[in-house]
Amino acid sequence: MENKRPDHKLLYYLSKWTKINECDEHTILSSFDTLTIKKKKDILVVGEVCNHIYFIIKGCMRSYYADEKGIEHIFQIRMDNNWISDLESFFSKKPSNYYIEALEETTLLRISYDRLEKLYVEVPALERYFRILFQKAYLNSLKRLNATMWEPATERYADMLKENPEMFQRVPLVYIASYLGITPESLSRIRRQK
């Protein structure tokens, strides 16, 4: 029988990388708070410390900063069953340079730094999962930086379309262009050529 809990996807993703039992499941789920964010609302603003990491049950979020000219630069776009946070602020306890905003009404699970540390003790197998998660986040950031520096925009667009076709149905193209590091006009030109 399928699990009807809205948070079952979290348990599914955790169990892909580590072994957890029913008792662990209860401990894990009780460690997270559930919240729903309306479209266009922020869960983090520049200058605040990022006190949580978030698992998106359903919805779409972006993290971005605005430069001195007010131009927005998108760092992350995340949809259902993905994590989002400002890990630098989360681990360093320093103010964030990013906003995190809901692009759709979004339901999230969140956990604080202190609660996550306690959870590592209560369910030691989770340390492995989060180590892998944080390593992947670091590698993805490096990959994205390298792609922005070395790959043509057409390749970055093709990779994104292949990896996240749904994103083009749910995220405004102006945000996708920013994420790819190109202008909306360049993105329109690339899309016309395909």
Image: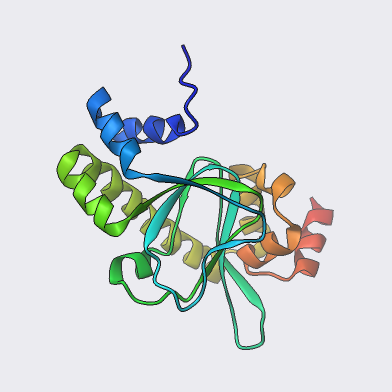
Q: Residue furthest top?
A: 1
Q: Is residue 71 left or right of residue 51?
A: right
Percent position (x, y) of residue 17? 30, 35
Asked if 74 appears above or below 77 in the picture, the reply is: below
In front here: 187 or 168?
168
Percent position (x, y) of residue 36? 56, 48
Percent position (x, y) of residue 45? 52, 71
Q: Quarter-wise, where is residue 178 in the image?
A: bottom right
Q: Residue at x 50, y 62 (%)?
A: 144
In front here: 177 or 162?
177
Q: Quarter-wise, where is residue 85 in the image?
A: bottom left
Asked if 168 appears above or below 6 in the picture, the reply is: below
Q: How many numbered discs, if any?
A: 0
Percent position (x, y) of residue 179? 61, 63
Q: Is residue 11 left or right of residue 187?
A: left
Q: Residue at x 60, y 50 (%)?
A: 60
Q: Residue at x 77, y 59 (%)?
A: 190
Colour scheme shown? rainbow
Q: Residue furthest bottom?
A: 68
Q: Quarter-wise, where is residue 157 in the image?
A: bottom right
Asked if 23 appears above or below 38 in the picture, the reply is: above
